Every structure is written in C-alpha cells, then in structure tokens.
Image: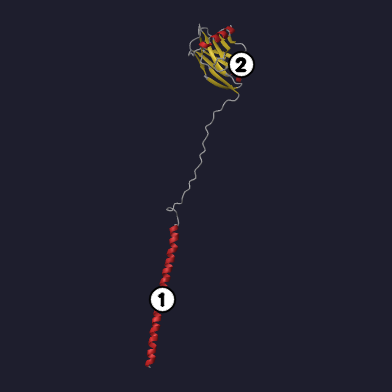
Amino acid sequence: MQPRLWLLVAALLAALRDSSALVQTPASLTAQTNRTVMLSCEAKTPPTNSRIYWLRQRLAPSANSHYEFLAFWDLTKGTVYGKEVEQERLTVLRDSSRYTLSLQSVKPSDSGVYFCMTVGNPDLTFGKGTQLSVVDVLPTTPQPTKKTTLKKKVLRCPNLVTRKGPSCALLIVGPLVAVVLVLLVSLGVAIHLHCLQRRARLRLLKHLRLYPLEKFSR
C-alpha cells in the first residue's frame, strides 16, 4: 500500500493547491542539532479516512524536487512509517483533530519543508507546509550598536565684563595718569623755581644798580 501511496502522491503533485482545511504551525522553524522538534497539523474538517500523512520536501520546489513519505497516523495501527525512515526518531501523535509530527535528535539532513496531507476521493488536500532548518549553532539576534558620540571641545573666550579684578584698560591708564601727574608736578616745581630765580636776579640787578649811586653820592 505504501508504494501505491507514493505513486499516487507523485502523480497528483502537479494538482497541489493550498487549502485552509489543514492548518500547519509553525510556518517556519529553526532548531539546533540533537533537539526535539514538534510540527503541528490541525484538520478543520475531519478527513474521510481519518488518516493524516506527513511528507518531506528536502529541496526548494522545482522540477527536480520530490516528496518523501514519512509516516501517517491510523486509528487502529497507530503510526505507520515509510521506507528508510528512522522510526526511533519519528513519531506521529493525535489529539482530537490535531496531528503532531515529533522529530527527535534532529540533524542538518532533516532540514526541508514538511507537509501534512489527507487523501480524499478523488482529491488530495495539503497543508501549506512548515520550513524546518536544522543548524549546529542557533543564530544570535544582533544587538543594536551604540553610537559613540565625540564630545566637542568648546573654546570659551574670557568674559571681560564679568571678569573680576582690574581690566587691561585700567592697568594701562593708571600708569599713564601717574606719569602725567608727575610731569605736571615737575613742571609746576620748575616754573616755581624759575620764578624764584627770576625774582632773585631782579633783586640782584636792582641792588647792583642802587649800590654805585650810593657810593658816588658819598
């Protein structure tokens, strides 16, 4: 029965159309090596034969890609496996209308798109698939880098208005005023001395003029 099922899936693959009757979650999943992965398929309408098949597509959809039959769940037999399937790592579980594919100890070769499917009369109904990527190291979310802002150096000129102490103008004008005062005092003293000398000369001349006259009169 399994080879016939595989031939049926391969023959009707071209008629595959997305359907909301089977809802698969999650849409994509990235798992680390040796972890356990759970893929869910919920049947919105009960399948006619109470069977949910699980298929895997390793390559991206193309003319060379194909589907591998993994397993299906049967009401009386439980999990029925396909050929060359590692049964110890794969299990199909049922909970009401939800069918779960459990993959244990996953490895990179398990990567691919997993589809759940029901077989009707005459159509096949597929879920939209779950993209599984198995990696050795999970990618880390990059943290936003903080931009380092350089502090600008501000050159501040001294405020002449609020500056304490004597300003440059006072320092320059002060000595000039002192020099002028000294010069004025010196000039005053010189003028006073010149006046005194002139008076002394006039007295001396007056005295010399009077002295010969007194001597002649005697």
Task: Determine the residue located farthest toward the front in the rendered image.
Answer: 63
The earlier-in-sequence mark between 2 and 1 is: 2
Q: Residue, x 38% and y 90% (percent of image)?
A: 214
Nearest to viewer (mark 2 / mark 1): 1
Mark 2: secondary structure: helix
Instruction: Give, as a three-letter code, the residue at label 1.
Output: His
The image quadrant where one finds the C terminus is bottom left
Q: Is residue 214 visible?
A: yes
Q: Which residue is mark 1?
A: 194
Residue 41: image location, x then y, percent: 52, 14
Quadrant assignment, res 57: top right
Considering only vertical position in the picture, is 34 above or below 159?
above
For residue 29, which quarter of the picture? top right
In the image, is residue 216 above or below residue 125?
below
Amino acid type of the residue tagged 2 in the rendering: Arg
Residue depicted at x 56% and y 19%: 132
**Label 2: few (<14), some (14–19) or many (≥20) C-alpha neighbours in 10 Å:** few
Residue under the image location 43 percent in, 62 percent down: 174
**Res. 106 visible in picture:** no
* Residue 105 point in image, percent of width and height: 61, 19
